[in-house]
Each structure stands twice: as C-alpha cells, then as structure tokens.
Image (cartoon, rainbow, N blue to C red):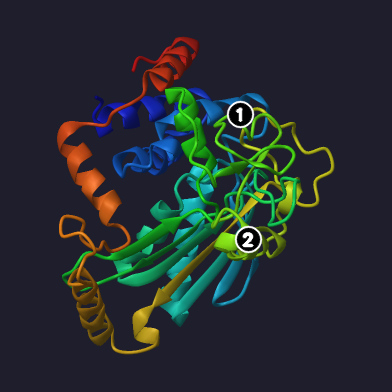
C-alpha cells in the first residue's frame, strides 16, 4: 500500500525530471493520482511510464505555451502546444468556468493535447463553483464501429458533474466502450481473461483474450454488439470525437495519435494532437440556484430510496463507487500491482527518484 502523498510526490518528481516546472508538475500529479485515489487504477500511476514514453518520443512539450486561439464571450478554442493533457485539461476547464461566471455558460475546445487522465477530474472542478461541469476527450483509436473490423475511435469518455446542496453530487464518468483499454491492461498484468463483450479479434469475432486488441483486434462500443445496442455506444463515441477534435482542429477517428505503445505513430495527421471539450454551466442562468440544488438533493435522495432487487445491493448514485474508494484509500492507502511497481522503480532508477 502507498499513500496518496507518496504516489503524488513520486509522479511530481518524475514530471519535474522530464522538464516541467514545479507548478506544472504539481498540476500533472494532481490530475494523475486523483485516478488512483478514486479507484480508477487504469488511469493513475500505472500510466506514468506511458507519459514518459511520449516525452521520450518528443510528443510531450514540458514547457508549453497553452493559449487561446479563438474566442467569444462564451466559447474558446485552446492550442495546448503538445502539453500533457493532465495540464491542458484543467486549464481548459478553468477557462470554461471563468466564462460561465461572466455570461452563464462556458464552452472550450482544446487541440494539440495528449491523454488527460480521468474525465471526472475536470468536470468536478465546476462543483467548487456550484456549476455543472462537462468533460469529453477523444483517445487512441482502439474501437471498431458496430459492424466494422477497423479500429476507428477511442474509448472517448464522457463526464458530467452536477452539484447538490447537502446530498453527494452526481458525478458520471464513463467510457463510451464496454470497458476502457486501461482495464484491459490491468487484466493483462493480472494474467486474466476479459469478459465476453469487451473485445473482438482481428476477424471481428468476440473474444475473451485480454491481449486481443494488441494482437490486431478492437475494443467494442458500449453494448458490445448490435443485439445489445452497441450502435448507441458507437454514436456516443462519435459525438465525443467530433466535439473534442473536429470542433477544435485536433486529430479525429483513426488519425488520433496513439497513447498505447503497440500502435505506430500516425503518419498522415489531419489535425494537431488529440482534443478535449469542456463545459461549465451556472445553474442560476436557468433558475434560482438554491431551488435547483434543493431539487437535486430531492432527486438523489429519492433514487437512493429505490427498492433494490437484492436487499444487500442498494441502488447507487453515479459517483458513489469513486467516493467510497476515495474514503477507503485516503484512510488505508492505495494498492499498486507489482507489475506497476516494477515500472515505477525502473522510472525511478532512470531519473534518480525513489518511490
């Protein structure tokens, strides 16, 4: 077990070692380790080696000039200057929040970025201002569209955070695939198979081989197959891709530069880097804030009162699992797989940092 502070300090030192300022490294570590704290192990410290690999491939700019290139009172497009998405993502959300403070809502697209960690980190920033937060990003093309063999989309997550008055906030954070690729990586480290419906092989046949994507297969859209409404997952992933990349000028579809090491870099990009999309909404732009927050409390409380199918398995509110994990791990520490520890020790030896 490791404490949040141990993992955060290690990640921060690695980010400094590859050229980031203390401030940028702190932000990157904040974003990254929030995933481990909230139980999303696939997107936390286990990804640190991957970010360093991108830096070594000259795909990460450690001294970026993140700047607005197009703007209206309620919108902005940001050029992330090949920065870590762990840094440009929070900056994009801050701009959206500031615009919402001024005119009611703020909408920001980001291009020329990289993987930004968990989508929920960014949407949750709006909760501090009693705003609704929205966070989208496209990602490495690992997903085949319904009826297709080719990898055309990323896991393209959606996160929406909605404030409450006294109840726990509503925090949705989900991939638009049946499972994120990071969960496959966890299964691979544990030498376990994947559930049927997560992956198809290179011929388009469903498989439980957790290495199936590495071997030429693809992740499946949310739903798994047409019979189970995978076309809806395909549509959701496409919407995220368009909002994040076509709107901003980033790469989209199969041209998104891959985060994963088993895919070759894109040779014919149609845009710059990968893209994100952020939204912030002041609820008092629609109705009195107190009325909204009270009704959200009522909404949450009523759903918690839903009669469960099994008495010992209550209905949950989106965000409950992550809140529970955060409470447990803040108290008892964060478990890290041995394969990940080995990767971290390798990084530590390379950059003179002790875990």
Q: Nearer the viewer, mark 2 or mark 1?
A: 2
Disc 2, SS: helix
Q: Is residue 347 left or right of residue 109?
A: left
Task: Identify which residue is drawn at 52% across, 51% down.
Answer: 178
Q: Secondary structure at mark 1?
A: helix
Would residue 89 be seen by someone viewing this image from the given angle?
yes
Q: In this orientation, which residue lies closer to the viewer: 305 or 340?
A: 305
Q: Is residue 321 above or below residue 167?
A: above
Question: Disc 2 versus disc 1: distance between alpha carbons?
Answer: 39 Å
Position in image of residue 342 (x %, y %): 42, 15
Vertical comparison of 332 with 269: above or below: above
Using the rendered image of the protein, determine whether residue 251 is visible from the camera's viewpoint. no
230 left or right of 158? right
Q: Residue at x 33, y 26 (%)?
A: 336
Q: What residue would you read off at disc 2?
A: 226
> In the current view of this chain or complex, which residue is farthest to the bottom?
287
Query: What residue is shown with label 1?
Result: 55
Q: Position of residue 180 (x, y in %)?
A: 51, 45
Which of the two discs, 2 and 1, labels the residue nearer the N terminus? 1
Badge 2: how crowded within 10 Å, few (<14), some, or many (20+)?
Answer: few
- Residue 305 got which mark? none
**Which picture quadrant has residue 303?**
bottom left
Residue 129 placement, left or right of 211: left
Q: What residue sits 74% from the left and 31% below the top? A: 264
Q: Position of residue 29 (x, y in %)?
A: 40, 37
Q: Are marks 2 and 1 in contact (CB under 8 Å)?
A: no
């Amino acid at each position: 077990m490791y404490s949040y502070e141990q993992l955060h300090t290690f990640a921060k030192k690695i980010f400094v070692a590859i050229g980031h300022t203390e401030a940028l490294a702190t932000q990157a570590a904040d974003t990254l380790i929030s995933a481990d704290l909230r139980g999303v192990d696939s997107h936390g410290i286990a990804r640190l080696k991957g970010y360093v690999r991108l830096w070594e491939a000259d795909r990460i700019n450690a001294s970026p000039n993140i700047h607005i290139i197009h703007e209206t009172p309620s919108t902005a497009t940001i050029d992330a200057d090949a920065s870590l998405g762990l840094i440009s993502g929070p900056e994009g959300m801050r701009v959206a929040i500031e615009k919402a403070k001024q005119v009611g809502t703020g909408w920001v697209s980001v291009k020329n970025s990289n993987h930004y960690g968990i989508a929920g980190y960014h949407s949750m920033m709006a909760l501090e201002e009693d705003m609704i937060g929205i966070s989208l990003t496209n990602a490495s093309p690992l997903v085949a569209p319904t009826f297709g063999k080719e990898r055309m989309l990323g896991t393209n997550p959606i996160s929406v955070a909605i404030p409450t008055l006294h109840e726990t906030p509503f925090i949705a954070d989900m991939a638009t695939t049946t499972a994120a690729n990071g969960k496959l990586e966890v299964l691979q480290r544990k030498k376990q198979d994947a559930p049927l419906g997560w992956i198809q092989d290179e011929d388009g046949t469903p498989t439980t081989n957790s290495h199936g994507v590495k071997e030429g297969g693809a992740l499946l859209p949310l739903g798994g197959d047409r019979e189970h409404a995978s076309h809806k997952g395909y549509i959701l992933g496409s919407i995220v891709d368009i909002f994040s990349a076509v709107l901003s000028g980033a790469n989209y579809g199969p041209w998104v530069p891959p985060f994963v090491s088993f895919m070759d870099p894109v040779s014919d990009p149609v845009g710059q880097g990968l893209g994100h999309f952020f939204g912030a909404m002041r609820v008092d732009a629609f109705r009195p804030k107190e009325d909204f927050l009270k009704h959200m409390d009522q909404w949450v409380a009523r759903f918690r009162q839903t009669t469960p199918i099994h008495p010992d398995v209550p209905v949950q509110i989106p965000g409950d699992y992550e809140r529970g994990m955060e409470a447990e791990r803040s108290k008892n520490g964060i478990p890290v797989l041995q394969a990940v520890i080995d990767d971290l020790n390798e990084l530590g030896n390379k950059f003179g940092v002790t875990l």
